[in-house]
Image (cartoon, rainbow, N blue to C red):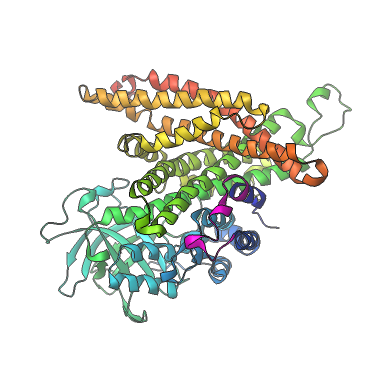
Amino acid sequence: MSHYKTNLRDIEFNLFEVLGRDEVLGTGPFGEIDSETARAILGEVERLSREDLAASYEDSDRNPPVFDPATHTAPIGESFTKSYQAWMDSEYWRLQISEELGGTPAPSSLVWALGEMVLGANAPIWMYAAGPAFAGVVHRNGNDRDKRIAQIMVERQWGATMVLTEPDAGSDVGAGRTKATPNDDGSWNIEGVKRFITSAEHDMSENIMHLVLARPVGVEGVGGPGTKGLSLFLVPKIHFDHESGELTGERNGAYVTGVEHKMGIKVSNTCEVTFGDASIGGGEPAKGWLLGEVHDGIAQMFQVIENARMMVGSKAIATLSTGYLNALDYAKQREQGADLTQSGDKTAPRVTITHHPDVRRSLMVQKSFSEAMRALVLYTATWQDKIQLAEHAGDAQDAEELQAFNAVNDLLLPIVKGYGSERSWVLLGTESLQTFGGSGFLQEYPIEQYVRDAKIDTLYEGTTAIQGQDFFFRKIVKDQGKALGLIAAEIQSFIDSEAGNGRLKNERQLLATALDDANAMVGHMINDLMSAQDEIRNIYKVGLNTSRLLMALGDVVCAWLLLRQAEVALEKLTSGDAASLGKDQAFYEGKVAAAQFFAQYNLPKVSAERAIAEATDLSLMDLDEASF
């Protein structure tokens, strides 16, 4: 039996009943993918994920790749390779790329709906299969040479990596010291060491294209300190003919010099990569080509990073969803203790643990969060749909409107990644695993692996603290609150709406209070930021609350999305009868219950977070380091 439990019904509910994706499917750039086709693809990827992709999940954890320092290789096991090839053979990855690259473009909302299932079944498959998506970035930013390279990457299904982090720089990307020096033939030699590079070595494709941030030296007007001095280079593992794509057989001087021993996602090779070290391999230089012949590395790389952050949030949320569904199945079968109302009667029958109040609370916490955050991912993806449609429209599209779409997407990404990964990791350990009792600690069940695999989601592509700082300083302050204002207006419009069933009146009021509290937190933090012009140390007060704000606004947005779903569900319930609704009656009732529970359980806490933020002083920053 597969470890992976999907929730295709909820995915389709989000896409077609709440977010209205029927309106964009089969139109404009998505002409080849209508609603009927989309549903068929969803059904097939659900089956593929649950069967072929999930099949190697446990084995690849127990038998991870082993790095050979003599050959600089880390071969992937047979079972995972088979799962990976099943995904590549399905060719559904082509839905992520343009027609120019051999793709069949689909709305981002459909792509991430499929992504949830692949990531939930066996996340490293999606990671190793990043080549086509990275090729899209190369094609979008490249000159004619690079566009051909992008085509080759897709045609030959090469792997690809994003190469940012250095051992001494960590998250401070601008402190990177890897350098690039120009050659007479237009190529560049890359020298340096990078760390934590996902998929930098494997044997599932004939070549791997590294997208490397490096600092140009010896060239007037480029390079220099900080992130603005970085450029992006295409550095292949093996040299190839730039027209035909055929490998020349010559090894490039980009060698994996270590593979990390990790807590989770062990089949995903996390590598140290050394570029241009004469003492390694055959001493070859690591030759690369400047993407687009433009020194705009950090902006180009952020196109990769933004996709990766969406992936990380989706992975985390997908894991929480299957964690909950596994816990639910167990709770429905596990008999233990008498009902609480009969606890004094030693002869009372044993009941399944779903009868116990705290287990029910735990299950509804898991259900409401997993469904809320699925809605968060797909709602965010609808803004990406708007961007796709606007870009396709070209000159006819209002540039200001396109800019607004991008700003809202940028605002939501830290919530997807930071809030989504943090909530998912915590709930997997404190609720999903806990539902199993002592059995959850055993490898008989997949939850312990879920917990280990999910922890990385709060760490890579920017830790939660970094997401919080990015969210406040760049996505709110730098944007002058425009994108936040658009989302807040949508939420306020829902609160003020007279539509829907009176059963949600209390929850609307809770949402209204939480929105006011969240807006007040933003205002207070902006005041602290402005006061730092006179007293620079007040910037610490902001830094102490950026993660708090991220989580609070995540709760507000998720509550609103669930209540939107509840409104749709109530309309279905009141317009149909039990016979016509069938199994959907329980589904819709569950949607209403989840929304009400989430609002009642989480939204009152936003008032407390506001109070904490407003009471923040500098005492923590004044404390001597020796006192910690």
Residue 21 included in the magenta stretch of the image: yes
Up the image or down, 624 lies above or below 286; here it is above
Residue 574 position in % (x across, y down): 74, 36
Q: Nearer the viewer, residue 15 or 300?
A: 15
Q: Quadrant of the C terminus?
A: top left
Residue 177 position in % (x across, y down): 22, 54
Number of labels in the image equals: 0
Up the image or down, 53 lies above or below 242; here it is above
Residue 480 position in % (x across, y down): 32, 34
Q: Nearer the viewer, residue 412 or 167?
A: 412
Residue 568 included in the magenta stretch of the image: no
Quarter holding residue 336: top right
Up the image or down, 48 lies above or below 416; here it is below
Quarter holding residue 458: top left
Which residues lie in the magenta part?
Answer: 16-34
**Is residue 443 at all visible to an observer of this figure?**
no
The residue furthest right is: 347
Residue at 19% x, 72% y is 186
Residue 491 position in % (x across, y down): 50, 33
The residue furthest left is: 220
Residue at 64% x, 32% y is 500
Q: Is residue 406 left or right of residue 426?
A: left
Q: Nearer the viewer, residue 550 or 443?
A: 550
Residue at 67% x, 50% y is 9
Q: Quadrant of the N terminus?
A: bottom right
Quarter holding residue 498: top right
Q: Is residue 557 left or right of residue 537?
A: right
Q: Nearer the viewer, residue 235 or 578?
A: 578
**Is residue 567 at all visible to an observer of this figure?**
yes
